[in-house]
Image (spheres, helix red, strand yellow):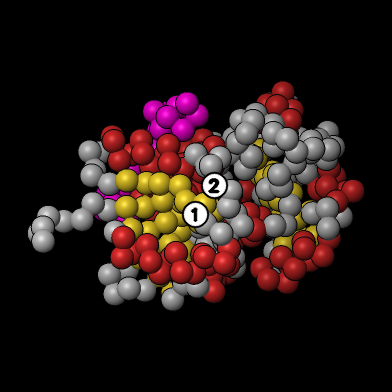
Amino acid sequence: MSDAPRIPLAGVIGSPVAHSRSPFLHGHWLCRYGIRGHYVPMDIAPDRLADALRMLPELGFVGVNITVPYKETVMDIADLTSDRAALIGAANTLIFRKDGKIHADNTDGYGFIENLRQSAEGWDPTSGPAVVLGAGGAARAVVASLLDAGVPEIRISNRTRIRADTLREDFGNRLKVVEWVQAGNAIEGASTVVNTTSLGMTGKPELRVPLDALDKSMVVTDIVYAPLETRLLREARDQGCTVVDGLGMLLHQAVPGFERWFGLRPEVDDDLRQAVLG
């Protein structure tokens, strides 16, 4: 039997998962830093998910990313969860510990904030209210990170109001629920505007929220990255706003997982963007 150290393996689990850009992202870092490791996509059926997660460490896996539709499901499988994953109610990063336990974390909010800080120079979360469109899983991560960064008020609007009301109950009175038909009005006077819905994504309907209230003082971002420039970002750019596309969130959310799995903190730069886009 060989005494050579095992080559660390990581990957992304979802269903479907063939569309994921994460293998290009992590593959670029592994190559750049000369790390002997691999990152692979895995399409696993729902009834095999728990068994697969328990088996992967035996095969040499040190952790995995989790994408739709399993971000909530893995919370019931993991042995340990971070405070932020528990608050958000979902995990996108699993670490397989040496003691055999699965640790669940959520780095989506971290990726969102780091993308703003890198791409919107001088962005000050405390300067005024934020508007968050959508109230799904991504919105929960965004809301948690904005509150943690010091945003004084979040105006949240969702096509189905009950989901927005649930977020307010979970995150407190710094959240103000706005009816979807009034979402355009909520933008007035805001400092930060965020779309967390799939509206505007390739193959999805456009975001039809009126954008007349956009002002050049605002930072506007969309977590959608296909296309890179959505209608929201295009109109915001035309109004002189600082715009931030959604690709950076994907890149930055991957940093903590890569560091835990492969022992090196990677850099997010233009070379990485081009590798993922290419």
Task: Say which residue appears at 60% left-offset and 36% top-offset.
Answer: 225
Q: Is residue 271 visible?
A: yes
Question: Separation of disc 1 and disc 2 at Cα?
Answer: 7 Å
Query: What are the residue bounds of the magenta stretch?
Result: 259-278
Res 96 → quadrant: bottom left
**SS for callout 2:** loop
| Left or right of residue 253: residue 220 | right
Magenta segment includes 269? yes
Question: Is the residue 49 above or below the residue 41 in the image?
Answer: below
Q: Which mark is residue 199?
A: none
Q: Is residue 149 visible?
A: no
Question: Is the residue 255 above or below the residue 87 in the image?
Answer: above
Say whether marks 1 and 2 touch (CB < 8 Å).
yes
Question: Is the residue 64 above or below the residue 50 in the image?
Answer: above
Looking at the picture, tell me which residue is in the foreground, 195 or 173.
Answer: 195
Neighbours of disc 1 within 10 Å: few (<14), some (14-19), many (20+):
many
Mark 1 lies on residue = 13
Question: Percent position (x, y) of residue 5?
Answer: 16, 56
Question: Percent position (x, y) of residue 219?
Answer: 64, 38
Mark 2 lies on residue = 17
Question: Percent position (x, y) of residue 130?
Answer: 68, 50
Give the quarter of the figure containing the N terminus.
Answer: bottom left
Task: Say which residue appears at 27% left-offset and 53% top-offset.
Answer: 8
Q: Main secondary structure of the magenta part?
A: helix
Question: Percent position (x, y) of residue 73?
Answer: 58, 67
Say which amino acid is labelled 1.
Ile
Looking at the picture, tell me which residue is in the foreground, 259 or 114.
Answer: 259
